[in-house]
Image (tube, coloured by chain):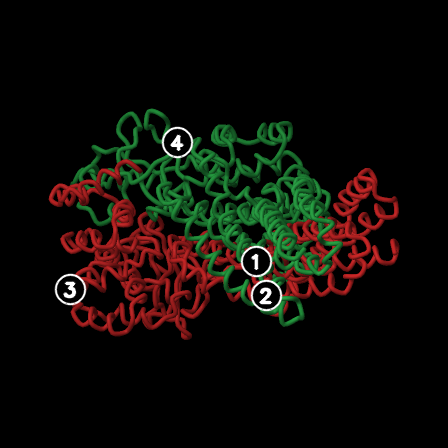
Chain colours: A red, B green
Amino acid sequence: MGTRVEELVALVREGRIEAFIERAWLLEPADLADVLSDLDDDERLALVRVLPVEISSQALVEMPYEEHAEDIVAALDREQAAGIVDELEDDDAADLLGELDRDDQERILSAVGDRRDVDRLLGYHEETAGGLMTLQVVTVTDHDSVGLALEAVRRQAENIDDVTEIFVVDTARRLAGVLTFKQLVLANSGRQVREVMEDVVAQVFPDVDQEEVARLMARYNLPSIPVVDATNRLLGRVTYDDVIDVTEAEATEDLLRFGGVSPDEALGGSWGDAVRSRLPWLYVNLLTAFLAAAVVYYFERSIAAIPTLAVWMPIIAGMGGNTGTQALAVSVRRISLGLVPVSRMWSVISKEILVGAFNGLAIGVVIGVLAVMLGEPWRFGLVVFLAMSGNLVVAGFAGSFIPVFLERLGVDPAVASSIFVTTFTDVCGFLLLLGLGTMVLL
Amino acid sequence: MGTRVEELVALVREGRIEAFIERAWLLEPADLADVLSDLDDDERLALVRVLPVEISSQALVEMPYEEHAEDIVAALDREQAAGIVDELEDDDAADLLGELDRDDQERILSAVGDRRDVDRLLGYHEETAGGLMTLQVVTVTDHDSVGLALEAVRRQAENIDDVTEIFVVDTARRLAGVLTFKQLVLANSGRQVREVMEDVVAQVFPDVDQEEVARLMARYNLPSIPVVDATNRLLGRVTYDDVIDVTEAEATEDLLRFGGVSPDEALGGSWGDAVRSRLPWLYVNLLTAFLAAAVVYYFERSIAAIPTLAVWMPIIAGMGGNTGTQALAVSVRRISLGLVPVSRMWSVISKEILVGAFNGLAIGVVIGVLAVMLGEPWRFGLVVFLAMSGNLVVAGFAGSFIPVFLERLGVDPAVASSIFVTTFTDVCGFLLLLGLGTMVLL
């Protein structure tokens, strides 16, 4: 793949556009999107201007979010932009236009032949079932015969790109069941649709969050899920390929939050975007860091008397931070995947405390002995042993309790990024080391 | 859902098994799996013993990995276990049996009617295309007429649960193209299959890693991907629902690695498992923590002279750790999603250094001024300003360079868990603060 993209990019740069277009017709949209991504902004716009809309439209929707395909569309003349929108499936068109401001949307849509579907879809929030769905559904009526239904499917399917399932509705378009192509093809054509259809396993309203949509489709292994209104009338469907995109996006969000980055930060955004996304978190962290520093300040006289305590500070605090981060990673992911029923949350926390206690003993003994071997008095060894063991118990507790507690409050537990847990373990680690040191050694 | 599960659990506990089974027939497998998960081990085994295999088989494969459904199957008598395997699709049966040791597998399989498919699938590694695929494919021959093909599909599809696509093969069963049901139903029955079929967009060998399989299916929005042998003969197919599972599993692995946890740790495993998975990492971390401590030890006399330096240590080191973790989260995720072509890696690193420099100035000025306001001399303010700014530049570099470097070495960049980055920023933070402090203030 890599070399093929480079070859195609070379064709464009050499100005051999005819040859490029000939090959572009045979490319998958995702592969052409790679070529577009590799070009610089001016080259890309110039190329899209001369590409037939049948090719460019599909490639534009396959470009990564951060490449801002919508900016290319906005830079085209109105007729070509409208031609691209006309070519696209309704949900892809709405996704692309949804990134533009209202003026650009209007300018382009005013030249589109039939804009009703796109207009309707633009009304839904992009991270909901409505924002993901296509209005293109194949429907048959429950009291039709299978033979008649097959005729209806033939008529409708021609204009729909990817038919995952056939939805069965009553005369008021209320959802009554689903049919796969297989059932339709296998069933005796004289039977009634309602006799061969299956029950709807899951359905969603358009305002349901995309994460819940993905969860339901994964849970029940659905190729598509119907979207209905409050009176159970069929509006559209969300398909399996959207679920994969949502699952990837949510995983990105979890990891960024975990690392203390705003989940809105585009992975390939500019450095200015990154500063805007991260600096507020760092200021929050600065406040929490002062808590840990305050503990050290309180024991300043102990440190002046025994400066070696300062040498052990980063070890006790650092190990606590890492133990807490381990517990946090496991707990956040368990909650994210819906693996922890409320009734078992305390068992999660007590498990992590136990793990912290065991690891605390294992690490504590090592550093206690090491301190003595390095020439410190045995009482100093005892202090670092106790501080380490204690801090790792605290770390197990903080790493599991904080996300569970946030989940109970209805806050996304991934917000409990490592920042809060490491503050907690810094404060407790310093308190234990310097407090015990003051008591035992001074 | 929650209440329904509780009602059903109550029925089981009250011994009203007849009533339970009556309702269980109407449940989706994933919902029945929730009931099984909520029961304790003895109750669960007793229930599975009396459930018809048509119901229990599907529910067992929907149980979360960590609940060890295979242990239930192993505890059943041979005939019932074989009955469950007989009921399952070949890939589900192989997944379930794959978790058992060879003896248990053999004992159960010896009572299974036709074990050939399961035996074949058990030969593939579970995290490859072969481990994910089902051998159940609907095939038609390229020179058949559409009418004949439709007949063939009718014959084959009856025994296959979920027909995503129809594969077109030549007389030697070499893969030649794909057909959707839609194309088959729409096409004129007199035409040849090869005239209406589409090209194969992507195909994989059985030993291809599951992550690559998921990437291809997501990239090309495929409902299934054909698995072929070295001579292009069709072996089986991997379906969209497997991709969602793989995407979730890989995201879990990324987050655990990021948090310094072995990706093999079962999210709901015992505390002993957790200790085994995490303690080795903590020992690695202990070694790296001593590096940071060594820096502090080197400057012990400076700390004895100016103990306030110890108060600012956790602030400089902590902010560096968090800035590094931010850069790491973004970089790891970008690499994971394949968003960074090798040619752009240096641009990723230079962006992160720029972000670190800007945030370093923004945070450095605040704490420099604060130090002076708290009564420290202006030269002390200068030291903390310089140490903070410098450490955040280092953090941006370490958080992006370490994963990029590991990727170049062919090591999974997620291994660059926060442990290494925070060690780096601890060491550099202490060096800057204590080194500059010694130079400027003593």
Of marks 4 and 3, the one in the foreground: 3
Mark 2 and mark 1 residues within 8 Å of each other at the beta carbon: yes
Circle number at residue B205:
4
Pick the quarter of the image with the C terminus of chain B: bottom right
Q: Residues within 10 Å of mark 3 (few under 14, many from 20)?
A: few
Mark 1 and mark 3 residues within 8 Å of each other at the beta carbon: no
Pick the quarter of the image with the N terminus of chain B: bottom right
Circle number at residue B388:
1
Instruction: Tell me what residue is drawn at x 17 percent, y 46 percent.
Output: B188
> Going by the image, does A50 lie left or right of B124?
left
- Nearest the viewer among A414 and A148 is A414
- Residue labelled with disc 2: B367
How far across and how far down the image is residue A65, in percent? 35, 57
Subunit of mark 3? A
Q: Amino acid at mark 4?
A: Phe
Subunit of mark 2? B
